[in-house]
Amino acid sequence: MVKIAIDAMGGDFGPEPIIKGCIQALKKKSFEPILVGKKSEILPLLPKRYRDKISIVDTDDVISMSDGATEAVKRKDSTIYKAMELVRNGEADAVVSAGHSGAAMTLATLRLGRLKGVLRPALITFMPTVNSKRSVLLDVGANVDSKPEYIAQFAIMGGCYARDVMGIKEPSIGVLANGEEDSKGSEQTKATCKLLQGTKGFIGNVEGGDIFNGSCDVITCDGFIGNLVLKSSEGVAKTISFLIKDYIRKSPIAITGALLMRKVFKLLKKQIDYAEIGGAPLIGINGCVIVGHGKSNPKAIQNAIFQAVNYIDADVNKHIVTAIEEFNQKDT
């Protein structure tokens, strides 16, 4: 059974939503949760009937959002450090954390290490599309100023994830650029495209709109660019939601229409709600780490746990190692 180490203290709202999310997940999937955090705060929130199903690793230290990411390396009693050590020592298969994302990524890279052949790990996010599926965008923040070799490997790893976890038999892969033509893009993206030529599923350059129109399954880019795309997309979604609510509130006719379209609005909210996804997998490391949003509610934690279980069950890392080895030998 898959064992998941869960940072119980890392989120913005303390352990309560994390514990609730863990319990919700247990009701639907079989796995062994290990809550890492302050036992004195966890136990009162844990129903007695679940205490024999959930292990607790007691520690008082929590990396706060104001702490530097590298500080986590020194604080060996922190919740995120201890969670990573459980995976490193083989006592857990995956880590789920809604805490300091920088600390989680730093410790994952330094304590768990990279998979064989992987130059840099990458952070994945899942973007809504018009065909009700999701596209894979990576990297969205683990690396900046990436070399073309890194970005090309992100594409290979993203393709593995799309096949293994999302069930896309032959995922299409594109490099994010400012135009579809081969002549478009920076020196970085042009070099990346050259490296990916001949790779199964590779379709060349894709534009920002292709992330959302469903024409490409896996979009690869530098982490600086990917993070800008992610944050901009979140901002646009919030702005549109605000404007819709504001216009409805100001018009009695619109209020009537909104009541009739409640199901439509519910489906739209589901498409853009981060809680439906759960978190961002850090891919390319020797283990599984799911980085959740700091404001994660119980549903988000539940889905982050499901992500971790599915990742381990699909044996994604084994397939990444094979795919990277084949990719590296392609032009030799």
Image (spheres, rainbow, N blue to C red):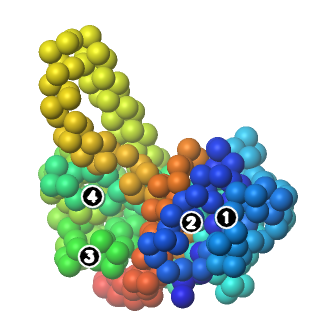
**For mark 2, what is the residue?**
23
Q: Residues within 10 Å of mark 2 (few under 14, many from 20)?
A: many
- The CA distance from mark 3 to mark 2 is 27 Å
Mark number displayed over residue 167:
3
Q: Residue 247 appears at what percent x and percent y?
A: 25, 16
Q: Quadrant of the N terminus?
A: bottom right
Q: Is residue 83 visible?
A: no
Sequence-first tag of 3 and 4: 4
Number of the front mark, 3 or 1: 1
Q: Amino acid at mark 4?
A: Arg
Residue 48 to residue 317: above or below: above
Q: Residue at x 22, y 59 (%)?
A: 133
Which image quadrant for residue 194?
Answer: bottom left
Q: The residue tagged with tag 4: helix, strand or loop?
A: strand
Q: Residue at x 26, y 76 (%)?
A: 167
Q: Residues within 10 Å of mark 1 (few under 14, many from 20)?
A: few
